[in-house]
Image (cartoon, rainbow, N blue to C red):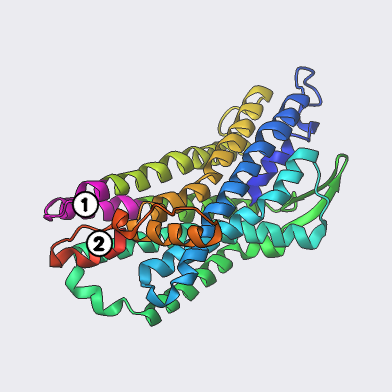
């Protein structure tokens, strides 16, 4: 992502050559401590959580439906995303890129692909829930394995297409502090493209889809005579709120950074440092979303929890010996909401 230039800017004090009050040591220490620690935690938690999702769903692939396939690919997307974090963790800790030009393009493109594919699969899961709950009788026959595979391939192709500029134009460049990995300094077109795709495809459209679909889903669920409806409503609200709280501050910071570069808002040393710091901090917290996806979309499901505990019991001797399937027995629902249950109780 070109937003990583916020990191490089902390090591570039040319902007403040005439300002003696600027101290690059403060953000440098911030990078080494805060970002390194947070990225490491996101990598560990994201790898464990999404890895468990992949293992469980792969083991029960013969029983998969469209929701399971979307969950599987959502976990793969988040794994692809977190696998790039060790490289950026080293990048922000030492202040220079040491992995070469090829890895610069590969890691940057993979980072973008993981980001967009994760967002796109969340949108598909939202639309799938909407169609099942609001238009249950119309779409049941179309939710086939073939349709799920075709949809999966299309989403990955779209994610790769949107991320192509990072695979092609990101490069390793050298300055007084060493090598850095970013778009070339004169590539304003691709920086604007990155800002547009991140804000529109990464936030505005997904948020509109989620709010629009869930505003129809919740009233429909409340009319159903199911003991699980309140838990499902809380889950839906949690999905939207978490997505909104984690990604909106980051996208606002990116937009402020864009306005500052165009001199639309103040661009003095104080504003410059504050906006750059805001981009980096909000970006870091937004990345924690990949750790929360397994919890929000998978671990709240009773069927998935039962499968996960069974897998852990086989891998870890003595684990869960007191657990029985009756602990996770699912409540019955009226016939009209049977497909709803399979969607939410993964």
- SS at mark 1? loop
Contact check, label 2 and label 1, Cβ < 8 Å: yes
Q: Which mark is residue 209?
A: none
Q: Is residue 12 left or right of residue 255?
A: right
- SS at mark 2? helix
Q: Quadrant of the C terminus?
A: bottom left
Q: Position of residue 110 (x, y in %)?
A: 64, 61
Q: Residues within 10 Å of mark 2 (few under 14, many from 20)?
A: many
In the image, 127 versus 309, the foreground residue is 309
Q: Is residue 52 magenta?
A: no
Q: Is residue 205 visible?
A: no
Q: Residue at x 39, y 73 (%)?
A: 64
Report the residue marked by disc 2. 341
Q: Is residue 67 left or right of residue 119?
A: left
Q: Residue at x 52, y 53 (%)?
A: 49
In the image, 283 versus 18, the foreground residue is 283
Report the residue marked by disc 1. 228
Q: Is residue 222 magenta?
A: yes
The region drawn magenta spans 208-233
Asked if 109 appears above or below 152 in the picture, the reply is: above
């Amino acid at each position: 992502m070109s937003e990583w230039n916020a990191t490089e800017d902390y090591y570039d004090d040319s902007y403040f050559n005439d300002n003696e009050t600027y101290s690059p040591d403060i953000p440098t220490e911030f990078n080494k401590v805060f970002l390194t620690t947070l990225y490491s935690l996101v990598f560990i938690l994201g790898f464990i959580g999404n890895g468990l999702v992949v293992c469980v769903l792969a083991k029960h692939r013969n029983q998969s439906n469209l929701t399971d396939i979307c969950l599987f690919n959502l976990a793969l997307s988040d794994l692809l995303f977190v696998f790039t974090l060790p490289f950026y963790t080293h990048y922000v800790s030492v202040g220079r890129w040491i992995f070469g030009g090829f890895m610069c393009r590969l890691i940057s493109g993979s980072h973008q692909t993981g980001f967009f594919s994760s967002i796109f699969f969340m949108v598909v899961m939202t639309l799938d829930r909407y169609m099942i709950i609001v238009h249950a009788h119309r779409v049941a026959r179309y939710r086939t394995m073939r349709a799920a595979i075709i949809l999966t391939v299309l989403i990955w192709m779209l994610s790769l297409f949107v991320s192509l500029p990072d695979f092609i134009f990101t490069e390793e460049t050298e300055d007084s502090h060493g090598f850095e990995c970013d778009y070339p300094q004169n590539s304003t077109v691709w920086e604007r493209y990155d800002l547009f795709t991140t804000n529109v495809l990464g936030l505005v459209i997904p948020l509109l889809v989620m709010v629009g679909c869930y505003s129809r889903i919740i009233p429909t669920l409340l009319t159903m005579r199911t003991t699980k409806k309140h838990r499902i409503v809380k889950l839906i609200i949690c999905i939207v709120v978490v997505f909104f709280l984690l990604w909106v501050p980051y996208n606002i910071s990116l937009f402020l950074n864009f306005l500052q570069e165009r001199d639309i808002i103040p661009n003095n040393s104080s504003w410059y440092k504050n906006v750059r710091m805001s981009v980096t901090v909000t970006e870091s917290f937004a990345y924690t979303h990949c750790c929360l996806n397994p919890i929000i979309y998978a671990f709240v499901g009773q069927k998935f929890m039962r499968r996960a505990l069974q897998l852990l019991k086989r891998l870890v001797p003595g684990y869960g010996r007191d657990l029985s399937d009756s602990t996770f027995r699912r409540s019955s629902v009226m016939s009209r909401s049977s497909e709803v249950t399979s969607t939410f109780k993964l």
